[in-house]
Amino acid sequence: MTTLVDTKKLTMVQAVTDGMRVMMKEHENVIVLGEDVGQNGGVFRATDGLVTEFGENRVIDTPLAESGIIGTSIGLAMNGFKPIAEMQFLGFIYPAFNQIMTHASRIRARTLGHFTVPMVIRAPFGAGVRAPEIHSDSVEALFTGMPGMKVVVPSNPYDAKGMLVSAIEDPDPVLFLEPMRCYRSTKMDVPEGKYNVPLGKAARLQEGSDVTIFAYGAMIEVVMKAAKTAEEKGIKCDVIDLRTLYPLDKEMIAESVQKTGRAVIVHEAPGTGGLGETIMSLINDTSFLYMKAPIERVTGFDTPVPMFALEDHYLPSADRVVQAIEKVTQF
């Protein structure tokens, strides 16, 4: 017998709100804290309505001090709470980096497992929304080399809610990155109530046999357009949404490239030091003898995100991805 699940069409930011609401209803120890998350509902309205529903003791407006928000959240997490700390933008997280690196990610190891830090750090990120300097940074790679910290990036409303629920339930700290370009770009049927999308598992969005494309976040829309163009040229792409950046789904990465023998990696963060380098190393370790062509990367440039006039040029485009696909298939 099939059980029908009620759904509602939500944008990604609405799905994030719904995920927090579901978990706050289920667990009284889930709290939200950050700058303007209360009466203002957050800079993107991701916490809109939560203070009315759950009160100021559970939806807490903090001073403009990222290190204080994270430091306080670590203490709360070690003492029975499940805090959801909002950074208004990922580029604002730098003052809190020390707290995350030296404490949040290390408490389990430091205490030999006697304490954990079950907290979620939510952070909008990415370019393409005409935001000022610092607001559009993609610096996820600063955290993917930090053992003890999970890093996840949903690309659609369904995954956003399900992965946020999983992140809140996780016993360790999770950096939950929300691509701003995806916040209101589309709506999707999202189940009401609680459901989980597992962390650490990638998703195959399209089956193909000629080349694998790896991407995440806002780049998924770009690579899907590129894959459609490639298919019109007779090239079948295996499109993998990584979803969790640390720990990576090593099994799916290896399985896909061993099938296709070619890989294109797409992310908007700068190429040097970006996640693409880690994926290339993983492919080299697991699948080198299966490869039919060198791996191609399509990334942002090794510069800060430029101002508005050059922002579109900075971001990977479908045309650039198609060029990379053709390069590996014609090698």
Image (cartoon, rainbow, N blue to C red):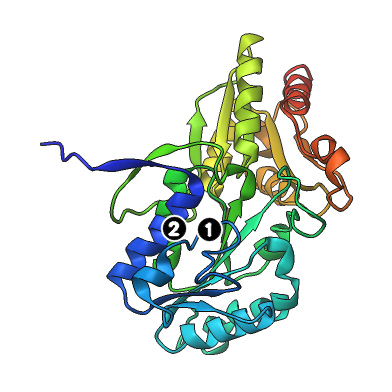
Q: Is residue 170 visible?
A: no
Find disc 1 in the rendering and name its residue: 45
The answer to which image quadrant residue 85 occupies is bottom right
Circle 2 residues within 10 Å: few <14, some 14–19, many ≥20: many
Label 2 element class: helix
The one nearer the camera, 71 or 248, is 71
Instruction: Note whether 326 is above or below 13 in the view shown.
Output: above
- Amino acid, disc 2: Thr
Question: Residue 113 at what x, y percent from top left?
Answer: 47, 84
Determine if residue 15 is in view.
yes
The residue at 51%/58% (across/down) is: 46
Point out which mark residue 292 bears.
none
Is 36 drawn above or below residue 330 in the view shown? below
Q: Are marks 1 and 2 in contact (CB under 8 Å)?
A: yes
Location of the C terminus by quadrant is: top right
Q: What residue is pinned by disc 2? A: 17
How far across and how far down the image is residue 67, in percent? 68, 81
Whether 233 is drawn above or below 84: the answer is above
Q: Is residue 101 left or right of residue 61?
A: right
Q: Give residue 39's position: percent from left, percent from top.
A: 50, 70
Toward which corner of the image does residue 52 lie, by quadrant?
bottom left
The tag earlier along the polypeptide, 1 or 2, is: 2
| Label 1 element class | loop
**Image-based side of 38 in relation to 52, left or right:** right
Q: Residue at x 65, y 16 (%)?
A: 229
Front residue of this view, candidates 8 and 217 = 8
Q: Nearer the viewer, mark 1 or mark 2?
A: 1
